[in-house]
Amino acid sequence: MADFIGALKDEGIDPQSLFNNIQSILAGISLDGRVLFMNRQAEQIFSDSYLKAEDKHLGSFPGDFNWDAIREGIVRCAVEKKPIALPDLSYEYFGRKGLLELSIVPLSSRYGSIAGFLIFGSDVTTRRKLEHQIIQSSKMATIGEMATGIAHEMNQPLNIMKIAAQRLEDGIEEGYALKEFALERVGVIIEQINRLSGIINHFRVFGRTNEADIIPVDICLPIRNAFKLLGEQLKGHEILVNLDLPESLPKIAGSAPRLEQVFINLIVNSRDALSEQKTGTPKTITVKAGFDSAENLIVVEYNDNGTGINAEIVNRIFEPFFTTKVEGKGTGLGLSISAGIISEHGGSIRAESSAVGACFTIFLPIIKAEEKNEPKTDSHS
């Protein structure tokens, strides 16, 4: 580090002026945790005023910047001798809350040993808020798109209640509504009210904005819920659903509504692709969930037998606004949002090129033993 700064000075370059013109957080850290330098962006984040930060110890600045996670990242960087990413580090500073996205890079001396560390990154608070707003808008668009299916889903229990009430009314008027008969009809009505209540609560939870409580989640729950929401639409398009969802899979740390959004986006894409199939051709969506014990990952395989994914575009389908649908039928954000949600959960999603249908594989890490009793809340959504 000193060699690098010295070389800049030898060339007549003011290192601090150079660092200050970099529009990212930039800080040099010694092996013992001292701050060797900070640029203006870093000092505006970490310091209460633009003060000289040199020789201050990491973590001596005011505010809670998740220093333990940063120190752990530095230790990992030293041990593994490779860059370490620290996404979405929460901070609180004089009442201001936000998120930082940092990377820690090892700096080598002329002899090849690690001489220090470079921390760089940015404040991603605004970006995360915008991403969450886009997700929320996408959910609202999905609910609007499902309006017909929702109406049908709610109309069924209403019709059953109407028939039960009419029979009860007839029984009372004609004098044959004995206690057992009346209780049976009332039981039917209560059952359907509970069914309606479940539908309404499901949409209320799915549509709300404050959904970011990170809790233990069985991946099968958001999968089933997504198919419940879109079940009537799939029936209307004569699409068969095959679910292979084992009981008692290890849980992941996540937000069930956000994960549900991932599967809704996949299902909507499948519905549109399968709608283009010729009449008489079986239309199917197959979802299989399992546990990879070697990697400690939940693995979800999602397949349909629609039009498939062209090899030329398979690497682009997760890009924002990329779509193969006709104009006006898609925003091109669904898969991009899905990939972002999976990434938020520490996982990954992979698409495979196929001429006989879409194939997606989702990988999500299971909860570590020490995390099981530590629910977290993202307060920035």
Image: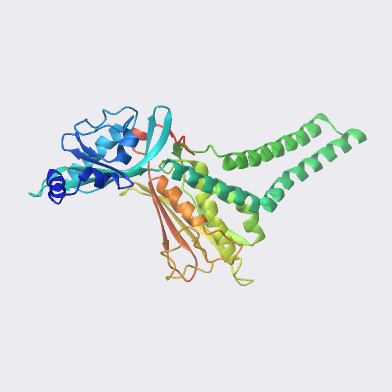
Residue 363 appears in the figure: yes
> Left or right: where does residue 125 sit relative to residue 46?
right
Residue 334 lies, in percent from the top left, at 52, 55
Q: Nearest the camera: 162 or 358?
A: 358
Q: Residue at x 77, y 31 (%)?
A: 183
- Location of residue 34 by image quarter: top left
Residue 104 appears in the figure: no
> Left or right: where does residue 134 sit relative to residue 299?
right
**Count of residue discs:** 0
Residue 351 lies, in percent from the top left, at 43, 61
Name the outermost residue toward the front: 12
> Left or right: where does residue 182 sit relative to residue 333?
right
Q: Nearest the camera: 246 or 381?
A: 381
Residue 337 lies, in percent from the top left, at 48, 52
Query: In the picture shown, does residue 328 fall above or below 186?
Result: below
Q: Residue at x 21, y 30 (%)?
A: 56
- Location of residue 171 by image quarter: top right
Q: Residue at x 30, y 40 (%)?
A: 40
Q: Residue at x 55, y 39 (%)?
A: 209
Q: Nearest the camera: 42 or 256?
A: 42
- Location of residue 30 by image quarter: top left
Residue 240 lies, in percent from the top left, at 59, 60
Specify the quadrant that holds the N terminus: top left
Query: In the picture shown, does residue 28 fall above or below 330?
Result: above
Query: In the picture shown, does residue 177 fall above or below 123?
Result: above
Q: Nearest the camera: 104 or 168?
A: 104
**Coloration mode:** rainbow
Name the outermost residue toward the left: 111
